[in-house]
Amino acid sequence: MNSTTKQKKTPILKRLLPYAGNKRILLPLAMVFSALSGIIVLMPMVYIHKIVSGIILSGAADGVSIRYYAILAASFAAAGLLLYFLALMVSHLFAFEVEANIVKINVRKMLAKPLGFFANRESGNLRKTIVDGAAETHTMLAHQLPDLAMTIVSPIVLLVFFFLFDWRLGLVSLIPMLVGMILMSFMASKKNLKIRDEYYEYQAHLSAESVEYVRGIPVVKTFAQSVESFDRLYSLIMKAKEFVVRWSMGYKNKMSIFEAVSSSTAFFLVPVAILLFTSGGDMRQVIGNSVIYLLIGPVFGIFVMRSATLRNFVYFAELALDKIDATLEHDDLAYGSQTDVGEGLEFRNVSFSYGKEKVLDNVSFKVNKGETVALVGASGGGKTTVARLAARFWDADEGTVLIGDTDIKTYDKSALMKKIAFVFQSPKLFKMSLRKNLLLGRSDASDKEIEKALTQSGAKEIVDKLEKGLDTVYGTKGTYFSGGEAQRIAIARAFLKDADIIILDEATAFADPENEHIIQASFRELSKNKTTLMIAHRLSTVVDADRILVMENGKIAESGTHQALLTQGGVYKRLWDEFQKAANWKIGSRNEELV
């Protein structure tokens, strides 16, 4: 990201304010409190000067006056701290509201995305992007922006103080501040900012690659490899190291000088004070003024560092919002208003591409109510894409997907989703009670209906074995199911939903033979009088389908019943022979042939 792009960006505060809702007034209120605190907290300097110069150094030590000025100084300091506390309290309320709304609003945006948006995105990464991104804004809003008000106002008050007591000492005390500001501007050069951008970009790549490497550790260890063998990760580590060194070395000398200069007020002040004293100045007055300037001089360095810190937190907040925006940068699907969804499913001259890769090419077929149509074929042939278009994960690039002779796009979203039930290859059970997991299918289902759905799916025996039955919380105290068992629970959820259109996407892929038999029986029951679209690699699961569509290179190569397709002796016959050979293969059979 170059600097030109950044200049065209919407200011971070303007991007965050809409998330504050009716609490946006809290931020300016916090900044006002902070600014007042920045003024009042410096007022004790006036009374300290009166005590030092007007009383102690004058030789007229007056306990009453000293106590009076000390009380005023302490009162102003306490008032300043109280105002700063109020500023932080109000800014934290504002920051928490923004953080919560970033999560809520962007989750709502995410839920408005088409189902295809989630197909190739991990839920953990989506959560991390939104939740962690929202958290990145918190420190900037809760601490840095109130400090910004103080950072602007307090130096102005300090400048007044610099020239209030002795303009000559004040002027020389400004030298460290000016040098510090110049050094800070050098450290914030375009070159350093570019290195910073590249560094954090590489950090993101490194983080993603590290996750991939950790997932692959079993393979790495099995084959006795090391991190160097994972070339991409190793090269990213080395590249990140180069950026860290370049970035750090770019600050090394300048930061050292800044640290030295920002606390070197005495180095400039003392010689001028001696010169004023030897030139006939009042010793008491010169010493009194010098004490004040020694106290307030280094404070400028603190404010310069605060401004630099603010820039860093603004940068992190911008990165977080940019990442959220980039993640959710996906067109929403427009839905119609028709709620009366028809029966049957039809693809009419449908074509679809993932980017430049054409996956479906002019596909047409129809599934009538009460009919089961199976999609088979080699991986990458377009089977899953057909199922996802049927469920409107995406919209077709060309052609039309129809339900009940009506374009699927014209239906209301809720009405359409109630019409379709999915059973996916990887069943999803949430960390809540099995009852609640099942009620996702239909929230108003009775216990009797739940029990019937469990019986129909063959899952009742699984629940009956559990001590707490349907009240068992999935995922706690070792309560997990095998792939086949989880699939049976998911099928029970589909029974409970009782939708007219059933989409089965490789639903027996992870089932063992026993579970597969039960699942197949439940599918037959689930599909009765329903419009069923089934995708399968195991051809044994589709032999009873009313019609089998053989997908090849995004087209329907063949269509017919199991027996008719075998008789044709085409693509399906070849797939069936390969399936039979694989099913009958035994360990050692190849060796026996060789002997």
Image: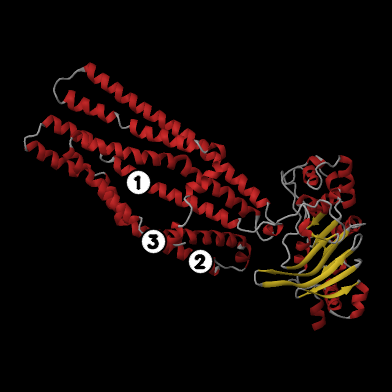
Q: Amino acid at mark 2?
A: Tyr
Question: Residue tagged by mark 2?
Answer: 234
From where the camera sits, is residue 484 visible?
no
Nearer the observer: mark 2 or 3; the answer is 3
- Mark 2 to mark 1 CA distance (whole Å): 35 Å
**Res 426 quadrant in image:** bottom right
Does 331 appear above or below 577?
above
Checking the image for residue 305, the label placed there is 1
**Coloration mode:** secondary structure
Closer to the camera, 111 or 308?
A: 111
Q: Secondary structure at mark 3?
A: helix
Task: Give above or below for 288 relative to 398.
Answer: above
Residue neighbourhood size for the residue with mark 2, other residues' Cα within 10 Å, grouped as few (<14), some (14–19), many (≥20): some
Q: Is residue 591 above or below residue 396?
A: below
Q: Is residue 120 left or right of residue 560?
A: left
Answer above or below: position of 470 versus 492: above
Mark 3 vs mark 1, CA separation in Å: 22 Å
Residue 516, x across and y down, in percent = 85, 60
Q: Are marks 2 and 3 in contact (CB under 8 Å)?
A: no
> Are there few (<14), some (14-19), or many (20+) residues within 10 Å of tag 1?
some
- Cα distance in 3D space between marks 2 and 3: 17 Å
Q: Check disc 1 and report its element: helix, strand or loop.
A: helix
Q: Residue furthest top?
A: 64
Label of residue 245 in the image: 3
Q: Amino acid at mark 1?
A: Met
**x and y percentages locating residue 83 in the rendered image:** 41, 30
